C-alpha cells in the first residue's frame, strides 16, 4: 500500500509505495482510508514540537474510511461500515483517570498518528472501541476535520460554560467548526486573527462572527470566554485582557509557545485560565450527534495523499481557509489551488 512516512522530525514526509498493509489484531479494525484531515497537531509531530514519535511513523488522526477486515473479538462493527478514527487511539481503562471519566488524561494513552500509525496511507489499523460511526449527512471529505478540529473545538467550547460573548483566537479548522456550534446555541462569536489577515477576518464574518479583527485589538465588548486555537503563548494575556470578570480563557492546542509573564490584575476578579487535553469517547458521541443535527458545514481544500507535504506547508504558512484533507483510494482530488469547497 502507499503511505506518507515521517523518517525523522523536521524532514518532509517520504512516499512509500510498498509499505506492508497492516493486519488487525484482537479488538482492532482494518480500515480502508478514504479521507484524512491535515491537523495542526500533525505539524507539531512533523516539525518535532511533540517529542519521540514512533519510528517510521505514518501521521494523520482525522481518518474516515470503511472497515475492510475485523480482528478477533469485534462483533458489533461489520465489514463495509464507515467509521472515523480520532487522535485518542487507546487507553488503559483501569487508571484513576480512566475510571473517573477522564480517559483523555490516561498516563498510558496512545495516540493515532503519533505513537500509532495514522491515516496518511491507503489503510490503517485502529482499536474498534475508539472509532466513531460517521453520520450519513457528511461526505468523507466533509467529515474528516470533525475527527479532531471538531472534537477539540467542541471540548473547548463546553469549557466556555455557555458564555454569551465568546472569542476565538485563531480562525482555522477548529474555529470554523466551533463557530457553528456556538451559533446553534445563540452565542455571539468574536474572531481574532493574526495581524493583517484580512482574508481570515472576512472568512469569520462570512460564517457569522459578529466582529472580526486582529489579535492585538480589543473587541468592542468584553468577552465572557475566550478559546485560543492558535499555538501562540502571547495570546494568553491578550485574551485575559479582553475577558470580563469571572470569565474563562481556554487554551485548546496540544502545543503552544511559552506564555510571557503578565500582571496578576489580568487574572484577578475570578478569571479562569485552563487547557484542553485530548478528548474522550463521550466527547465524540455527544459531538457527532450534535454535528449531525446542526448540521455542521466544513470548508475544506482537497489534496491527493501524495501531496501531504504541500498540504502541511499550506497549513504552516496560514494559506488555508478551513481545513486541508488528503483523499485516497480513488477519491478524486482536484488541484488544491482550484478546489476550495464548502461541503
Image (cartoon, rainbow, N blue to C red):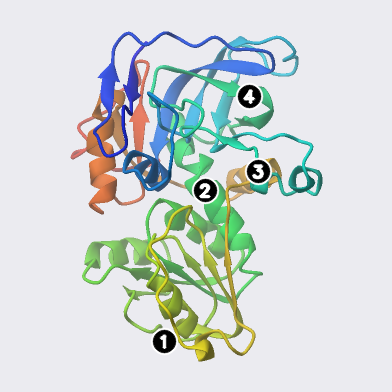
For label 3, the residue is 107
User: Of marks 1 and 3, which one's residue comes earlier in the chain?
Assistant: 3
Say if 203 sits above or below 45 in the image.
below
Residue at disc 2, secondary structure: helix
Q: Which mark is residue 127?
A: 4
Q: Residue furthest front?
A: 52
x and y percentages locating residue 157 in the rendered image: 58, 61
In the displayed structure image, the side of residue 198 where residue 256 appears, left or right: right
Residue at disc 3, secondary structure: loop
Label 2 neighbour load within 10 Å: few <14, some 14-19, many 20+: many
x and y percentages locating residue 217 in the rendered image: 33, 82
Q: Residues under labels 2 and 4: Cα distance?
A: 20 Å
Say if 273 sits above or below 137 in the image.
below
Pick the quarter of the image with the N terminus.
top left
Q: Is residue 224 visible?
A: yes
Say if 70 sits above or below 311 in the image.
above
User: Of marks 1 and 2, which one's residue comes earlier in the chain?
Assistant: 2
Label 3 neighbour load within 10 Å: few <14, some 14-19, many 20+: few
x and y percentages locating residue 211 in the rendered image: 39, 76
For label 1, the residue is 220
User: Of marks 2 and 4, which one's residue comes earlier in the chain?
Assistant: 4
User: Of marks 2 and 3, which one's residue comes earlier in the chain?
Assistant: 3
Amino acid at each position: 500500500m502507499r503511505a506518507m512516512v515521517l523518517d525523522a522530525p523536521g524532514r518532509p514526509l517520504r512516499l512509500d509505495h510498498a509499505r506492508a498493509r497492516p493486519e488487525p489484531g484482537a479488538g482492532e479494525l482494518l480500515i480502508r482510508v478514504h479521507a484524512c484531515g491535515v491537523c495542526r497537531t500533525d505539524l507539531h509531530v512533523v516539525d518535532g514540537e511533540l517529542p519521540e514519535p514512533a519510528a517510521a511513523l505514518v501521521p494523520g488522526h482525522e481518518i474516515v474510511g470503511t472497515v475492510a477486515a475485523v480482528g478477533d473479538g469485534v462483533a458489533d462493527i461489520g465489514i463495509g461500515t464507515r467509521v472515523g478514527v480520532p487522535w485518542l487511539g487507546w487507553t488503559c481503562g483501569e487508571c484513576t483517570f480512566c475510571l473517573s471519566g477522564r480517559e483523555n488524561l490516561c498516563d498510558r494513552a496512545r495516540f493515532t498518528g503519533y505513537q500509532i500509525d495514522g491515516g496518511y496511507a491507503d489503510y490503517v489499523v485502529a482499536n474498534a472501541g475508539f472509532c466513531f460511526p460517521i453520520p450519513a449527512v457528511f461526505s468523507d471529505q466533509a467529515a474528516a476535520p470533525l475527527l479532531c478540529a471538531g472534537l477539540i473545538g467542541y471540548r473547548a467550547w463546553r469549557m466556555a460554560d455557555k458564555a454569551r460573548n465568546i472569542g476565538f483566537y485563531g480562525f482555522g479548522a477548529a474555529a470554523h467548526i466551533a463557530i457553528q456550534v456556538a451559533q446553534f446555541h445563540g452565542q455571539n462569536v468574536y474572531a481574532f486573527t493574526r495581524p493583517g489577515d484580512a482574508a481570515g477576518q472576512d472568512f469569520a464574518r462570512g460564517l457569522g462572527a459578529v466582529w472580526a479583527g486582529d489579535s492585538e485589538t480589543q473587541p468592542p465588548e468584553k468577552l465572557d470566554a475566550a478559546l485560543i486555537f492558535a499555538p501562540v503563548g502571547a495570546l494568553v494575556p491578550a485574551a485575559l485582557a479582553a475577558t470580563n470578570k469571572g470569565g474563562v480563557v481556554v487554551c485548546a492546542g496540544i502545543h503552544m509557545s511559552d506564555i510571557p509573564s503578565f500582571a496578576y490584575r489580568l487574572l484577578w476578579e475570578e478569571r479562569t485560565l485552563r487547557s484542553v487535553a485530548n478528548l474522550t469517547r463521550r466527547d465524540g458521541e455527544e459531538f457527532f450527534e450534535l454535528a449531525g443535527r446542526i448540521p455542521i458545514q466544513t470548508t475544506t481544500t482537497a489534496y491527493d495523499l501524495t501531496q501531504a507535504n504541500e498540504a502541511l506547508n499550506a497549513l504552516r504558512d496560514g494559506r488555508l481557509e478551513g481545513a486541508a484533507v488528503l483523499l485516497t483510494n480513488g477519491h478524486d482530488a482536484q488541484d488544491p489551488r482550484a478546489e476550495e469547497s464548502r461541503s
